[in-house]
Image: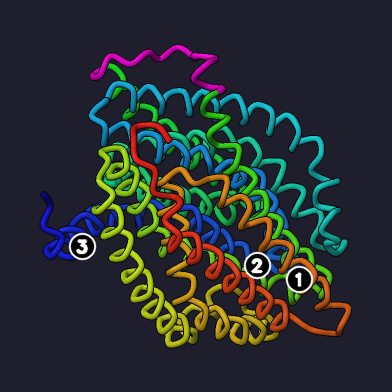
Amino acid sequence: MDDYRSTPRRHDREILALAVPAFGALVAEPLFLMADSAIVGHLGTAQLAGLGVAATLLATLTGVFVFLAYATTAAVARRIGAGDRRAAVQQGIDGIWLALLLSAVLVALTVPLAPWLVGLFGASDSAAPYAVDYLRISALGIPGMLTVLAATGVLRGLQDTRTPLVVAVGGFTANLLLNLALVYGAGLGVAGSAWGTVLAQTGMAAGYLAVVLRGARRHHASLRPDPAGIRACARAGGPLLVRTLSLRAILLIATGVAARLGDTEIAAHQVAMVLWSFLAFALDAIAIAGQAIIGRYLGAGDLGGTRAATRRMVQWGVGAGVVLGLLVVLARPLYVPLFSPDAAVQARLASVLLIVALTQPVSGVVFVLDGVLMGAGDGPYLAWAMLATLAVFAPLALLVPAAGGGLVALWWAMAVFMAVRLILLGWRTRSGAWLVAGAVR
């Protein structure tokens, strides 16, 4: 029988072993956008505004399929907990095939529809051409982006977050160097930033595939597409797709409202969203550890360990949120000027970041509980909870321009969005209805 009096120290080791390298891998994508924003921001406010619209659209188009990572992590971890490593790897390969099929459809739709998609945001005449160029070029990197999601889920489920860290560091370094060379050296402007990101994402996908293929050979898993396995992955990810679509709708509404407030507001909002995403991914490192640990414990039928790990991760989430909130406020004079020389953009951004800082402890708990429930395979509840959150946020955000509010008012609506998530996820976790043991939920 486990001695749960020693659980906190034991879980600290487990959480840190997975969360620390996961942090580096998770922040790769927001670091890509932060680097792009800093480089493009010095080309002009219209260019930065165009990047803001296009980056949000691209993140939405690819981000709705984040279930490729989340559902795969939980399913693979459960099979690892049950001792079936071959089936775990096979499940991951099915997820990668699903990613490739979805990406082919996305590229075929995004490239011709780019002007229409940008037009939905009401971007200004000066910003729209930059947004269209960036979106069309970046769409070519979608296969790499979705492959990275699926392959990352495989490795996380196998309790390996170090390999994603190595690939992410290489990808970020390549992205930064390519962007500098193509934007300034080759004089390609916004298009150069998009090409740099495409090349970096494709290189990351190739690195992940090499690792997964080695694992498949080692455990004698088939590399051929299995229609039944692909369909099973799609069904398992369905509720998480609804959950993510609802989340993306919230972020799209926020960006749409900001775009209608003016170029200065959307430029400041773009930088704020990039920083918010960076902080979210940083906090999500604990949630990723939660997905892998919770899935493994439930797969092994260890409900006591599941509860103990959950409590400890919530404590880590609160502490990390407090630390990040303080850093956001104290370091503002150092990083705000890096994103734009425009004094008006800097002023709007500085005000919004105070709200971002205040909500970080809440965000820490929200992301941890989200990860715990994903690791448990509790997708249907997560879908319902995010739909309910969208129903609260949408009218609040849409009232901002109607009531004459500005960017600060919009970000207070974002704070309400996080508070609603905290209430719904906290209630579910306390109920215990998500504690279902076994290799498959």
Residue plotted at (86% across, 85% down) = 404
* Residue 225 is one of the magenta-drawn residues: yes
Task: Tell me if mark 1 has few (under 14), some (14-19) or many (20+) residues whose alpha carbon lies within 10 angstroms of its own.
Answer: many
Q: Amino acid at mark 1?
A: Ala
Helix, strand or loop status at disc 1: helix
Evaluate whether residue 42 shows in this view.
Answer: no
Task: Specify the segment rendered in magenta.
Answer: 218-231
Q: Amino acid at mark 3?
A: Asp
The tag on residue 230 is none
Q: Which residue is mark 2?
A: 270
Q: How many marks?
A: 3
Residue 174 horizontal/vertical position (percent): 43, 47
- Quarter of the view holding residue 108: top right
User: 253 and 199: which one is in front?
Assistant: 253
* Residue 29 is one of the magenta-drawn residues: no
62 to the left or right of 69: right
Residue 271 horizontal/vertical position (percent): 60, 70
Does residue 302 sit above or below 372 in this rendering?
A: above
Q: Which residue is mark 3?
A: 12
Helix, strand or loop status at disc 3: helix
- Quarter of the view holding residue 242: top right
Of tags 1 and 2, the one toward the viewer is: 1
Residue plotted at (63% across, 35% down) = 140
The Cα atoms of the two marked residues, 2 and 3, are separated by: 35 Å
Name the N-terminal-most of marks 2 and 3. Answer: 3
